[in-house]
Image (spheres, rainbow, N blue to C red):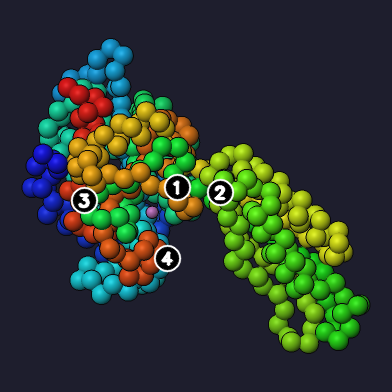
Amino acid sequence: MPIVNRVADLQPDIQAWRRDIHENPELLYDVHRTASFVAARLKEFGCDEIVTGLGKTGVVGVIKGKKPAGEGDVKVIGLRADMDALPIQEATNLPYASKTPGKMHACGHDGHTAMLLGAARYLAETRNFAGTAVVIFQPAEEGGAGARAMIQDGLMDRFGIEQVYGMHNGPGIPIGSFAIRSGPIMAATDEVNISIEGLGGHAARPHKCIDSVMVGAQLITALQSVVARSVDPLDSAVISICEFHAGNARNVIPQTAELRGTVRTLMPEVRQLVEKRIGEVVAGIAQVTGAKITLNYQRGYPVTVNHGAQTQFATRIAREVAGEANVHEMPPLMGGEDFSYMLESRPGAFIFCGNGDSAGLHHPAYNFNDEAIVYGTSYFIKIVENAMAA
Ligand code: NI
């Protein structure tokens, strides 16, 4: 028996919630409508406790099993979904497309939230476990570190969470299958901002100038040598300088230039190394060119690291839901995810649930696939029922 039978009955409701949330996307911490929607559903389901406003706009529901956890057993499991959308103009032509211009659920967080609501409804209805399930609905996954804000507001300690499980849909992964790996599964995402102050002047008199454009070009090239020549080729790092702003006339050497980019790594020691080498390269280029270069390196989300035992457990549960052949070990992704903060705080695992042949995440034509609902929801349910078996 793969999916939970009762979840198939709940599917139309979960799909309707998903589409309602999809129609009403909200950004970062400004997820007031979505959070109210979630809290109202949790109340209807009869959760034992509902807390709103954690991490500004996060919502938590507490569901107690039919008996307390046994001595030495896991007592509290946290399940997490994210609620926020993206500043993208939707181009799906769906009947339930975003009603707000310039905002869209292009990462499927509408689906994550609806699936976790479905699991909460089932768990509150059946209570067929020993211990406590805590359903976590966080704001601001898309760059606002909402998970960290909820942890800083006491999420883990207040509810006694011992293990935590998260899920993301995966375009390109077939419907009804899962992908997961132990160890690093998603990258640390850091920001690089570089300001170059050269000496502007006439394009025909370069010897009297310090050409900020040429300095920027040298920097961009030299920074790639960090990946090519400082990082072990068997480790992973990406440096992408994606913005280069300078000049506004063809015959004027500009005084200043601005570079902005992102750094992705999968190991703390590689992250450390890359940050240090970027500083050294910037200082070196400043010295050889005579430009004044200011580096502002901002650490973003840490590496998302799946814990060994919990990943094994999650894999077993996913296999139970999807079948042995439909759970795959995946390579890590260089994208970021703020569930990383939760996995730094408690053991757990992050899994990808197949979204089929959809447009990619953050694409204007992306849509969460409602056929994934029964699988994702069943996975959440079975995590609780197996980790805290009654
Ligand atoms: Ni996402």
Q: Indicate yes or no: mark 1 CB to ligand 1 under 8 Å.
A: no
Looking at the image, tell me whether mark 3 or mark 1 is earlier in sequence order: 3
Q: Indicate yes or no: mark 4 CB to ligand 1 under 8 Å.
A: no
Circles 3 and 2 in contact, beta carbons < 8 Å: no
- Expressed as whole percent of the image width and height from the top left, the position of residue 109 reads 32, 54
The residue at the far right in this view is: 208
Q: Residue at x 50, y 48 (%)?
A: 187
Q: CA distance from mark 4 to mark 1?
A: 26 Å
* Number of numbered discs overlaid on the protein picture: 4
Q: Residue 149 got which mark?
A: none
Q: Amino acid at mark 1?
A: Pro
Q: Residue 87 got which mark?
A: 4
- Badge 1 is on which residue? 332
Q: Amino acid at mark 3?
A: Gly
- Expressed as whole percent of the image width and height from the top left, the position of residue 303 reads 51, 43
User: Secondary structure under badge 4?
Assistant: loop
Q: Residue at x 44, y 44 (%)?
A: 185
User: Secondary structure under badge 1?
Assistant: loop
Position of the C terminus, as image quadrant, is top left
- Badge 2 is on which residue? 236
